[in-house]
Amino acid sequence: MTQTVVITGASAGIGRAVAQQFGARGDRVALLARGEAGLRGAASDVETAGGAALAIPTDVADYAAVEAAADRVEAEFGPIDIWVNVAFTSVFAPFSEIGPEEFKRVTEVCYLGFVYGTMVALARMKPRDHGTVVQVGSALGERSIPLQSAYCGAKHAVNGFTESVRCELLHEGSKVNITIVQMPAVNTPQFSWVLSRLPRHPQPVPPIYQPELVARAVLRAADHPRRKQYWVGESTVATLLAQKFAAPLLDRYLARTGYDSQQTGEYVDGTAVQNLWQPADAATDHGARGEFDDSSHAHSPQVWASRYAGLVAGAATALGVAGAGVLAARRR
């Protein structure tokens, strides 16, 4: 059955890959982002894959703009069935080197952008008693790392408010669903345009996964939204369970390793284009993938196993205990 899908942050990275996947199913896909060249590229991807596309330039930190976008989607595509919140921006720097307006901007996009998208979606879905909201979360929403305090704080907040909303929907007996997909490190263009004050080029903490792989997990969550959350990638499972069982060890481990693991060996001068205040894909389409193809995984046994709850539970426990053991051994 063809559905109407809204994706924020759809011009690049995970949002772009998710749009491609929905397009391949023949869905009507509304694309919300700031970068017009990226939006044009995303629309072309959706249409080439077999879907219908509607690109709407939108800053998700502006509630009125999100509301207007939703009105346009329903006017042109019909009632919204699925809303996927993905939009991202960040600052890579020690907390003491992030300005208050920068921290506020990250929070507005990565947290309030999700709140606004969810508000707008539920305002339309709840009266119809139909629809699904999918939050694209992160392992960093439960286990923070150094140099990303603004982003980690926002992702923690997304987990908190999503849990509250889910409880309310359950209380109401609503058929509207909300779920969250906790992501690993992904090879997206963000590491080429994130505002960084690090001496070397930022990178995702390995292991790194391709956006097409994690996008398939988002589609599964949209199709099976009764599960509270989905974990994607072996590293996410190991990180979240190690956090549960050995959080103080993780603090010390990340204090030692978290700076180098988020930087390549390439020194930079700090003049690269960044997307905190303006889109980095306004004139140039960057696509879904970043520059780490050679070190990124296109397959994950955990993603396959997550289709079977019993299997993934056993694997998750084993990975978590193993991860905690490795950290304890390194600590000793």
Image: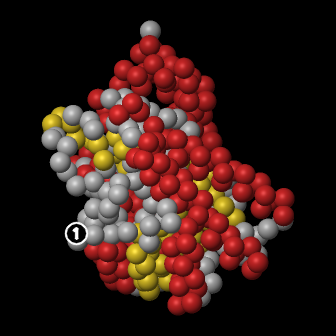
Instruction: Where is residue 70? Give x, y as percent.
Output: 56, 78
Q: Which residue is drawn at 49% across and 24% down?
A: 250
Q: Residue at 39% x, 40% y: name it.
A: 99
Q: Which residue is drawn at 51% across and 19% down?
A: 249
Q: In this view, does 105 lie to the left or right of 13?
A: right
Q: Which of 296 and 244 is in front in this view?
A: 244
Residue at the image point whose x is 76% and y is 70% from the top: 175
Q: In which quarter of the image is residue 5?
A: bottom right
Q: Is residue 197 above or below residue 277?
A: above
Q: In this view, does 192 lie above or below 57?
A: above
Would residue 80 be visible to someone looking at this image? yes
Is 97 situated above or below 222?
Answer: above
Q: Name the residue under label 1.
A: 284
Q: Which part of the image, by quadrant, shows the N terminus? A: bottom right
Q: Position of residue 180 (x, y in %)?
A: 59, 55
Residue kind at label 1, given as amino acid type: Thr
Q: Is residue 307 visible?
A: no
Q: What element carries label 1?
A: loop
Q: Is residue 56 left or right of residue 74?
A: left
